[in-house]
Image (cartoon, rainbow, N blue to C red):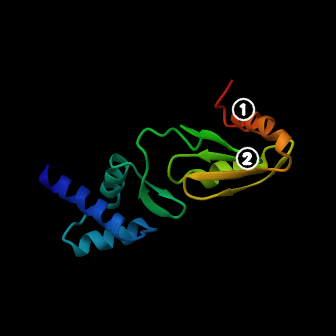
Amino acid sequence: MGEEQDLDEAILRLLGAQEITDQAVLQRLLAAEGHAPSQSTLSRHLKRLSIQKVRGRYQRVEPGAAGPTQGVRVLEAPPNMLVLKTAPGYAQVVGVMVDRAPDIPGLAGTVAGDDTVFIAVRDPSLLAEVRSQVERLLRLVP
């Protein structure tokens, strides 16, 4: 069990120290430290540690997050902005979902970071309507 834990610690340390975009690169870095996991062993460890490739690089994600809309919070920022808070790594996916949604009247567009999406609304009088449509789109309300 000690070797398994050592491998887990090495994986977490390496991913925290640098951006790793490929499992083969991670395998080489681990080998340089005296670990030699096969690809299937490495994949099993990544899954157990809740590490996924997000936006092109491997990183730890919130365990149990079912998808990009899991746990999204919607905040109003009057007069004409909504702010969506997502799990780390999901803001861009959620932003694209909102941008591509048909028939959200008053939606000007979105700007997304890692865990935050800003939604611009053309007319401040439509803020509540856009919020309602976005919440329905993301299935935050029935």
Q: CA distance from mark 2 to mark 1?
A: 11 Å
- Residue 108's disc is none
58 versus 32 height, above or below = above
Report whether residue 104 is seen. no
- Residue 98's disc is 2
Give x and y (percent) for residue 127: 78, 40
Most extreme residue toward the front is 79
SS of the residue under disc 2: helix
Drawn side of residue 4 relative to residue 47, left or right:
left
Pick the residue in front: 9 or 25: 9
Task: Judge the density around disc 1: few (<14), some (14-19), many (≥20) Cα neighbours within 10 Å.
Answer: few
Q: Residue at x 58, y 40 (%)?
A: 72
Task: Judge the density around disc 2: few (<14), some (14-19), many (≥20) Cα neighbours within 10 Å.
Answer: many
Most extreme residue toward the top is 142
Pick the residue in front: 20 or 85: 85
Give x and y (percent) for residue 132: 75, 33
Report whether residue 55 is seen. yes
Q: Which residue is mark 1?
A: 136
Query: Quadrant where the C terminus lies?
Result: top right
Q: Residue at x 23, y 66 (%)?
A: 36
Query: Which sits earlier in the primary sequence, circle 2 or circle 1?
Result: 2
* Displayed quadrant of residue 58: bottom left
How many numbered marks have been drawn onto this rendered protein structure? 2
Most extreme residue toward the bottom is 32
Q: Residue at x 42, y 70 (%)?
A: 19
Give x and y (percent) for residue 9: 23, 58
For the residues labelled 2 and 1, say whether their Cβ atoms are less than 8 Å apart.
no
Give x and y (percent) for residue 73: 59, 39
Kindly identify the amino acid type of the residue bearing the numbered disc 1: Arg
23 versus 96 height, above or below = below
Kindly identify the amino acid type of the residue bearing the numbered disc 2: Val
5 versus 137 height, above or below = below
